[in-house]
Image (tube, rainbow, N blue to C red):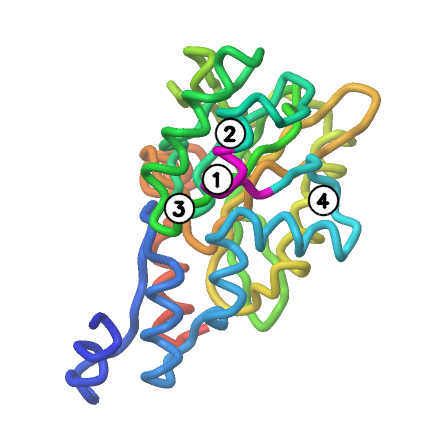
């Protein structure tokens, strides 16, 4: 329906764009139909569906946690006590952003209700179960122009309220050493390439694990929400990130 509306606008439509929402795949789908600059729809899906994302990372040897997909059949196995699993794990719906339906599961008692909730609220009726990554977390925004990744912001994230993951703030510039930051950015760029993102923006949530290095939590085909891309970055760097991202969507870069 979004694509139909966009195509009906004809030459009056200059570009399609989103920031901080779940609509990156819809943006790419509609923009492709209209011949406008965008990530491919396939790449945007890779950056939206968490199982597809993890599969891309695994195929391209990009560091990320081990995982498996859990559907209603797997839920039945858990309800019958037939699932063999080691904790801690993180349970998420496969098709949402913003940490909705996402929580840390520390034992078998917490696993079943977390799985039920994730599957119930998934549009596809599926969840993803991942190994828990214990480490500092960082948020990165970038412009992606003809496959070239230009990092435009790197922030320390403050996540609280375990077993849930609620970002209560972030700060720039980051307090980590430059060498560690370079490792994280390199991992982020490899993840972007693995997903196939080439034209638009990318936003990464990445953890740094002592003894292991950086591991990707998620990479989205949109700018960050939570006031980050629209407020923190301009205040800390004097860069209007939204304006630059809009230029890409308009074909001006």
Residue identified by numbered label 2 = 91
Q: Residue furthest right?
A: 211
* Rendered view: 52 above or below 139: below
Q: Secondary structure at mark 1?
A: strand
Mark 4 crowd level (few <14, some 14–19, many ≥20, 10 Å Cα): many
Q: Name the foreground residue: 164 vs 206.
A: 164
The numbered mark at residue 125 is: 3
Disc 1/disc 2 C-alpha distance (Å): 7 Å
Residue 78 position by quadrant: top right
Question: What residue did someone put label 1 on?
Answer: 127
Which residue sits at x=49%, y=43%? 71
Residue 141 placement (x, y as % from top left)? 50, 45
Please, what is the dominant secondary structure of the magenta stretch?
helix
Q: Is residue 1 magenta?
A: no
User: Who comes first in sequence, dot 2 or dot 3?
Assistant: 2
Which callout, 1 or 4, points at the residue further toward the start of the chain?
Answer: 1
């Amino acid at each position: 329906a979004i694509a139909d509306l966009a195509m009906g606008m004809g030459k009056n439509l200059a570009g399609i764009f989103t920031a901080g929402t779940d609509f990156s795949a819809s943006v790419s789908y509609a923009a492709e139909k209209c011949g406008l600059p965008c990530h491919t729809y396939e790449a945007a899906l890779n950056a939206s569906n968490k199982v597809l994302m993890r599969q891309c990372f695994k195929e391209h040897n990009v560091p990320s946690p081990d995982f498996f997909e859990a559907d209603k059949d797997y839920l039945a196995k858990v309800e019958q006590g037939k699932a063999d699993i080691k904790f801690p794990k993180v349970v998420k719906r496969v098709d949402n952003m913003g940490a909705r339906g996402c929580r840390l599961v520390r034992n078998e008692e917490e696993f079943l209700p977390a799985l039920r909730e994730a599957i119930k609220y998934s549009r596809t009726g599926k969840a993803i179960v991942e190994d828990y990554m214990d480490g500092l977390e960082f948020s990165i925004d970038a412009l992606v122009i003809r496959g070239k990744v230009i990092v435009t912001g790197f922030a320390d994230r403050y996540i609280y309220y375990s077993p849930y993951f609620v970002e209560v703030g972030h700060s720039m510039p980051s307090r980590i050493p430059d060498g560690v930051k370079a490792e994280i950015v390199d991992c982020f760029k490899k993840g972007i390439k693995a997903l196939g993102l080439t034209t638009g923006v990318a936003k990464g949530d990445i953890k740094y694990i002592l003894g292991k290095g950086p591991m990707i939590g998620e990479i989205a085909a949109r700018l960050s929400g939570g006031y980050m891309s629209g407020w923190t970055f301009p205040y800390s760097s004097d860069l209007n990130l939204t304006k630059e991202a809009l230029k890409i969507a308009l074909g001006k870069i």
